[in-house]
Amino acid sequence: MSEGVRGTVPWRNRTVQVVLASTLLAPLGVPLVAPALPVVRDAFALTDAQASLLVSAYFLIGIVVSPFIGVLADRIGRKRVLVPALVVFSLAGLAGYLAPDYLTLLVLRAVQGTAAAALFVTTVTIIGDLFEGARRNAVLGANIAVLSLGAAVFPILGGALAAVAWNTPFLAYALGLPVALFALWALEDTPSDHREPSDEHGRPTDEARLGYLRGVLRALTPAMGGLLATAFITEFLLFGALVTALPFMLTATYALTPLYVGLIITAVEVGAFLAAGTSGRLARTFRNGQLLGLGFVCYGIGLAGVYLATSPAFVALAVLVFGLGWGISMPAIDAAVSDRVTRDFRAGLLGLRNSTTFLGRATGPIAFAAAATVSGYRPLMAVAAAGVLGAAVVMLVLTRATISPSEPEPSA
């Protein structure tokens, strides 16, 4: 299962190359399209709220389907899910270029969001299958670093393409087709070692379905619930406080243009990229529970810095610190989830983790926007900072003895 325990990334490993190439495509989903939203709005005579549904439809579908995608990957193998997902992701995106009306475009985005959920679930699951210990953390960190790199670069590409026409950014989704071919050639399928009882048509029996469900439920321990909650809170804060609330605060306080607002928010990705690259080295010294606590400390310091900032440069520095926390904690979450479940059930649990992530992304903006109508944006940052720092203290105390990358795989 493991190719080593050193906290380094085997860059020449073909499976790692497939995973990282697939992950690099994921930010094409929203960061690429976001700069084109005003152009799409004008092209179809939409309101701002209607145009924003292109983002919501993409995320909301993943909340529902991610666990089922995980179950499918556990049953038929990772490659048989990842390769079709890459094809659907690309073709649905390319079809957006030819969409005759907004409703068609919205449906295509929902289809693409389903495929994107499969990309997130299967890539992380493959890393969990192939590696363990500090090396697992290192590769998961590289995965997050690549994701952050794409999220930082693709808005620039999307903005440049949207300057040509509203639908030009959708041509970029063609990049997924060669990645799909590479995955088809390079990946070895990794079906479950467990052979489920099946009927004469090859379908799993009721006993097999119940056995799988029991295995997943056994893995849903309080510690696993804490990991899922941590993933939710991370994305809830990122998309609520920084992606949604911060632009309004910067505009009202410093009268910044959208370009400068975008550059400040990009500091999150810079911080995540820098921190995620150190995941393997950190995992050799700290337990995953300690890394999660450290990540939350960075969230708290970052949000407190936004509240205390006296200049846009100070805000950017605070946002960078928040990004460092994101780059530290997300690889640790995925490593800890992978550590606590066997391969037979790993994709199902990571699918559930992906659902909580997408749920945080969908609800964070709504919650912060609603709360800001009562408190204002700057005081809201202070409240969020106090809450997350308190959570960091609790995590460091409670998870230190329960979440560790060195734990052996359980026999679920």
Image (spheres, helix red, strand yellow):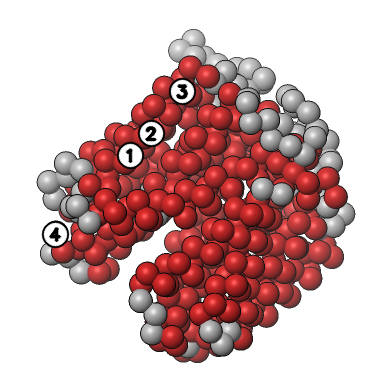
Label of residue 173 in the image: 1
Q: CA distance from mark 3 to mark 2?
A: 10 Å
Label of residue 44 in the image: 4
* Mark earlier in primary sequence (2, 4): 4
Point out the residue furthest to the top here: 200
Kindly indicate the quadrant of the structure image that contains residue 191: top right
The x, y position of residue 112, in whole percent, is 35, 42
Along the line of sight, which residue is nearer the eye, 182 or 300? Answer: 182
Label of residue 176 in the image: 2
User: Could you tell me which quadrant the N terminus lies in?
Assistant: top right
User: Could you tell me which quadrant the C terminus lies in?
Assistant: top right
Would you place residue 83 above or below residue 221 in this image? above
Label of residue 273 in the image: none
Along the line of sight, which residue is nearer the eye, 17 or 263? Answer: 263
**Residue drawn at point x = 66 percent, y = 62 percent:** 325
The x, y position of residue 369, in whole percent, is 43, 77
* Mark earlier in primary sequence (4, 1): 4
**In the image, what residue type sits under mark 4?**
Phe
Q: CA distance from mark 3 to mark 4?
A: 37 Å
**Residue drawn at point x = 35 percent, y = 76 percent:** 257
- Could you tell me if the residues under marks 1 and 2 are in contact, i.e. CB atoms within 8 Å? yes
